[in-house]
Structures are given as C-alpha cells and as structure tokens.
Image (spheres, grey):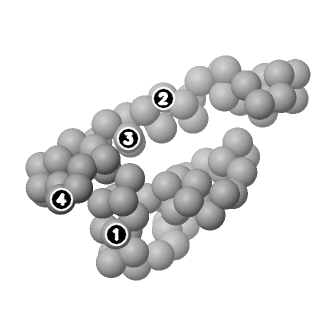
C-alpha cells in the first residue's frame, strides 16, 4: 500500500524504501487503494491476498536488486 499510494500521488519511488513502523494511511484507505490497483472489478479476498503477496514479493526483490540501487540510478537515469 505504501508504494501504491505514493505512485498514485505521482511521487518519486526511486528513493523510497518501506520501513516497518512508518505506515501512513488508514485501513479503509489501504483497502480502497488495493482494490483500485488489483486489476479486478470486484475482487474477492483471495484475489486481493494473492495480489498483495505477489506485489510484496516483487517489491522486496526490487529493493534488494543492485539494478534498482541509487548507484545505478545515478549512472542510468530512469533505469
């Protein structure tokens, strides 16, 4: 949710890394945002769960990737 809400507000995600304990937003806002980005018109709880698990997995890998680091970002703008 933290990434999606910032993406929705056109914030730069290149320098953002989620830190536990720094959660912003309410449960209602989170659910609305997840439903918006899920890609299903009326998602079930299972579909939302699968979407969040997949997104979490991808974002964790992205945060660990050398290709998404600030060092590479300085050399290859927009990469």
Are the residues at dot 2 and dot 4 in contact (C-beta closer than 8 Å)?
A: no
* Gap in angstroms between the C-alphas marked 2 and 1: 25 Å
**Quadrant where the image shows the N terminus:** bottom left
Residue 52 image offset from top left, x and y in percent: 30, 47
Are the residues at dot 1 and dot 3 in contact (C-beta closer than 8 Å)?
A: no
Q: Which circle's residue, 1 or 3, is located before the other in the chain?
A: 1
Which image quadrant for residue 70? top right
Query: For the view shown, which residue lies furthest in the front direction?
Result: 41
What is the crowding at mark 3: few (fewer than 14 residues within 10 Å), some, or many (at least 20)? some
Q: Secondary structure at mark 1?
A: helix
Are the residues at dot 3 and dot 2 in contact (C-beta closer than 8 Å)?
A: no
Q: Is residue 77 above or below residue 44?
A: above
Residue 18 image offset from top left, x and y in percent: 55, 52
Task: Give the mark toward the camera: 1 or 3.
Answer: 1
* Gap in angstroms between the C-alphas marked 1 and 3: 16 Å
Are the residues at dot 4 and dot 3 in contact (C-beta closer than 8 Å)?
A: no
Residue 5 image offset from top left, x and y in percent: 52, 62
Q: Which circle's residue, 2 or 1, is located before the other in the chain?
A: 1
What is the crowding at mark 4: few (fewer than 14 residues within 10 Å), some, or many (at least 20)? few
Task: Give the residue at mark 4.
Answer: 42
Task: Give the residue at mark 2.
Answer: 61
Residue occupying the point 66% across, 48% down? 13
Task: Give the residue at mark 1.
Answer: 32
Q: Which circle's residue, 4 or 3, is located before the other in the chain?
A: 4
* Gap in angstroms between the C-alphas marked 2 and 4: 28 Å
Residue 53: assigned label: none
Q: Is residue 55 above or below residue 23?
A: above
Task: Give the residue at mark 3.
Answer: 55
* Gap in angstroms between the C-alphas marked 3 and 2: 10 Å
Task: Give the mark toward the camera: 4 or 1.
Answer: 4
């Amino acid at each position: 949710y933290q990434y999606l809400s910032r993406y929705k507000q056109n914030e730069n995600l290149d320098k953002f890394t989620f830190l536990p304990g720094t959660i912003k937003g309410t449960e209602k806002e989170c659910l609305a945002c997840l439903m918006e980005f899920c890609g299903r018109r009326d998602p079930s709880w299972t579909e939302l769960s699968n979407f969040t698990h997949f997104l979490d997995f991808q974002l964790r890998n992205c945060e660990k990737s050398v290709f998404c680091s600030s060092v590479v970002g300085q050399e290859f703008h927009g990469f």
